[in-house]
Amino acid sequence: MIPITIISGFLGAGKTTYLQHILNCRNTNERILIIENDFGETSLDAKQLSASGATVREVTSGCICCSLQGNFKNALIDILSTQDIDQIYIEPSGVSKLSEILYTCDDDDVTSKAYISMIITIVDAMQAPMAIKNFGPFFKDQIKHCYAILLTHVEDEKQVEKTKQLIVELAPHTPIYTDIDALQQDIHQLKSNTHKAHEHDSETCSCHTCNDSEDYNGAHHDNHSHHDHDCHHHDHQPFVTHTFHNLQSLDDTQWIDFCNNLPSTILRVKGIIPTASGPMELQYTPQSCAITATHLNDYHLVVIGTEIDISSINEKVCSAS
Ligand SMILES: [Zn+2]
């Protein structure tokens, strides 16, 4: 049986950084396959992850929890029947519902060869209050269905406490980590706890009625939404994405100014940008903006938000041609 780890998290929380960390620390003989799902049309992350020696399968231009559910399931089944691998990591798009992904994985063609061994949700401590308030259904679903939470951007202690409080209300039994190494140290223990809690199969699952036992990790309690899956199909109405090409070369500071002046409807910007000092990788969320040198040079900018003024962004960063 091949263990599957799902790395969930809202837009820009740090899912790829976490995966990169795992890849860098792994036993080199281990064959890892990553299913990378990007809401936008290109996946910058996939290029970086495959550079670290993992096999990466991309499922882009939509979300594997809804519009690309079929593509995702087929990719997973295909991988399980054709690839010789030791571990699978799934990185869903930041706007995925974890419950929908678990529902998709709950298929005989998958469960005969693999099992969900770990589900981690990465939460940006600075972003969490906004995400819960404005995008509750997506965010809460990710918190409620994971086995452990890793907080990122934990510099502000007050903010960290506030975010922990919000999480505890949603998932009182789920362990919260603020340090990636501490999480990795506990990971085997977390996995075995989770197995005790999940020894039932879906046919006989009585989670709707069972009481918390001592062994029960409780992370997903009350959350077997797949049992009534047919009643709650969702779409991604609140989110749109656009990829800009034809970018013009600007100074670092001009790119940062551009990001800092984006309207609050923009939740995520990332891509490879041309600057006076060469190609740079741009990573933006409303809480942070970073530009770092990169060897990649296929210039593009993916923008995700609830509303995108394409012509206004075009005017600011694309060359008139
Ligand atoms: Zn979805």
Image (cartoon, rainbow, N blue to C red):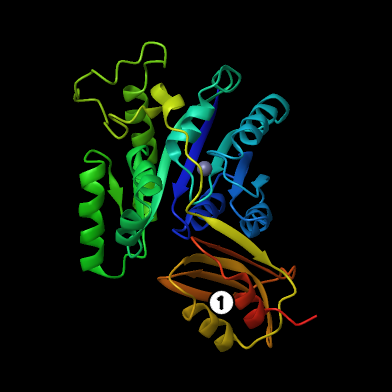
Residue 175 percent across, percent down from the top left: 27, 43
Residue 303 percent across, percent down from the top left: 58, 65
Is 111 situated left or right of 174 in this image? right
Q: Quadrant of the N terminus?
A: top right
Name the element at disc 1: strand
Considering depth in this image, is 219 or 59 the residue closer to the camera?
Answer: 59
Residue 54 percent across, percent down from the top left: 65, 47
Is 87 situated left or right of 51 in this image? left
- Indicate the amino acid at tag 1: Ile
> Based on the displayed image, in which of its 4 quarters is residue 202 positioned?
top left
Q: Measured along the vertical axis of the image, is residue 81 above or below residue 132?
A: above
Q: Quadrant of the C terminus?
A: bottom right
Residue 132 in view in this figure: yes
| Residue of label 1 | 291
Q: How many marks?
A: 1
Is 247 situated left or right of 209 in this image? right
Considering depth in this image, is 63 or 46 the residue closer to the camera?
Answer: 63
Residue 279 percent across, percent down from the top left: 69, 77
Is 13 situated left or right of 240 in this image? left
Rendered residue at 47%/80% (across/down): 260
Q: Measured along the vertical axis of the image, is residue 75 above or below residue 122?
A: above
Q: Measured along the vertical axis of the image, is residue 37 above or below residue 130?
A: above
Rendered residue at 29%/20% (across/down): 207
Is the distance from the Cβ of mark 1 to the nearest ligand 1 atom less than 8 Å?
no
Near mark 1 (Cα within 10 A), the count class, few <14, some 14-19 or many ≥20, is some
Residue 186 in view in this figure: no
Q: Measured along the vertical axis of the image, is residue 187 above or below residue 237?
A: above
